Image (cartoon, rainbow, N blue to C red):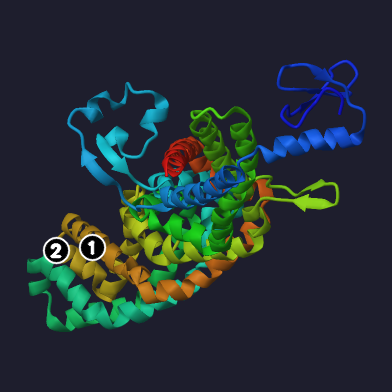
Amino acid sequence: MVGATAADPVVPTRDGPTGSFQFYDASGRIEPVTSVVDVLSGWSDLVEGTDWVAFWSIPVFTAVIGWLINWSGLWMLFSPIHFHGVVVPGLARIAGSLPRKVQEIPGVLRGGLGWQGIVPARAAKMGSIAVDRALSRMASASDLYEQLEPDRIAAHIVDVFRPEIPFLVDEIMWREHPRFWRDLPRPLRTTVVERVQDRLPDVVGEVMVEIGEHIDQLFDPKLMVIENFEKDPSIIVRIFKDFGARELRMMVVFGAIFGFLLGIPVAAVDQAFHIWWLLPILGVLVGWTTNLLGMLLIFAPADPRRIGPFKIQALFARRQWEASDVYGKHIAANVITLEHIGDHLLNGASGDRTRQMLASALEPAVNAAVGPAYGAVRVAVGTRRFDAIRSSVAESAVDYTLMPMRDAAFSVKQSANIRRLIAERCRALPPSTFVEMMRAAIKEDEWLLYAHGAIMGLAGGFLHVAVFDWWNVL
């Protein structure tokens, strides 16, 4: 090569206007390229000057950091189930004036400094969104009630309730109207009990029909889902982990892969400039990007897309069929259960209306229980007092009537239809709606995961600098 010696290495560069290569020696003189051999020779000199141990240590470091970022990111998503931390005096008072992003950190609005998993912290909101975006399209309150088979529920109530009738009638009457019950002849008491037992199937059947006709006003699936998710946030965590266990493990592995690949250009920049603070700064970018890619891997794109010969789709969306079964299983076993519906009907937002409606339905049964003596009893005790007795007995019977609905074992048997209905309707959802249902509640908190990745990337960059400074000293 003209003008170049072994002592004067040349560095290749591209001439802007022509796109041809030229070489600069150590003194800055331009050396013309005479052959491809000259180009390769120049690159060879450049490569020989690279510290390959330092170069490849960076992708290895970023791979480890990427693995740790996604592993700890998943922990942040799901753990702990309940808030762990300390109460900071005065924080609750000023929390409302803090930036919105800060308010979104679990525990801050309640004056706590600590952590709760993003998913359990947003369980109630996720339940609300699940109902609004998906469950409301899957099934109405009446659909869910019909799936529980009211006829079988009525038969179960009769089977459980009938042996208890003598004790329950006696208990209610002694509690509500002891004097009237004491003065009533024993044969007439026995007749009342027998008539109640005889009328029980018809009465319970009428009660179930009455509930079915008004179920949309008495039963709010959205409220019940929110209450149960809020009461037990582990439900939504189990849903994610049950159907997404494989995808979540892949997310951690891909964190290492993404970290390694992103580390290669970082290593090239580091070798080109040799500025110590570049690694921590680029580590922030790598950490943020690794978490972003991990979330995209799980949730985007929801609908399949073709890029050349490849079809790409979010991992969760690919598993919609299996996930629907898991979702239906958990909703039927832990949320929309016969036990919860019975409790919701009597003690929920419309509980007073339910009790009043059922008491009105039971009052004719009290008349029938007295039988032929109805007129005589009414005259003997007085119309007003008899009506009061009838109303109080009917109201007291409401709780007993629906108590068998809270039978956990029977509830499990009846859950199969709910599970099947939810799973079928969930499979029929568009992939975008299904993914949105799973992601919507945590989407606003994803910045916490990205920030966590950036902080870990920054720490990894400083750690690499410290380790290799120590290595060079040795």
* In the depicted structure, whether residue 138 falls above or below residue 168: above
Question: What residue type is disc 1 on?
Answer: Ser
Q: Where does the image place residue 428, in percent across and percent down from the top left?
A: 68, 56
Q: Where does the image place residue 298, in percent across and percent down from the top left?
A: 60, 50
* Residue shown at the point (48%, 47%) measured from the top left: 69
Q: Is residue 139 visible?
A: no
- Compared across the picture, whether 431 is left or right of 357 comes to right
Instruction: Report the number of discs.
Output: 2
Along the polypeptide, which appears first: circle 1 or circle 2?
A: 2
* Residue shown at the point (30%, 47%) measured from the top left: 83
Which disc number belongs to residue 176? 2
Crowding near pointer 2: few (<14 within 10 Å), some, many (20+)?
Answer: some
| Alpha carbons under labels 1 and 2: distance apart | 9 Å
* In the depicted structure, whether residue 87 falls above or below residue 343: above
* In the depicted structure, whether residue 330 falls above or below residue 443: below
For the C terminus, give its image quadrant: top left
Q: Where does the image place residue 370, in percent across and percent down from the top left?
A: 25, 73
For the N terminus, give its image quadrant: top right
Q: Is residue 196 visible?
A: yes
Question: What residue type is disc 2 on?
Answer: Glu
Badge 1 is on which residue? 396
Q: Are marks 1 and 2 in contact (CB under 8 Å)?
A: yes
SS at circle 2 = helix
Between residue 317 and residue 396, name the one nearer to us: 317
SS at circle 1 = helix
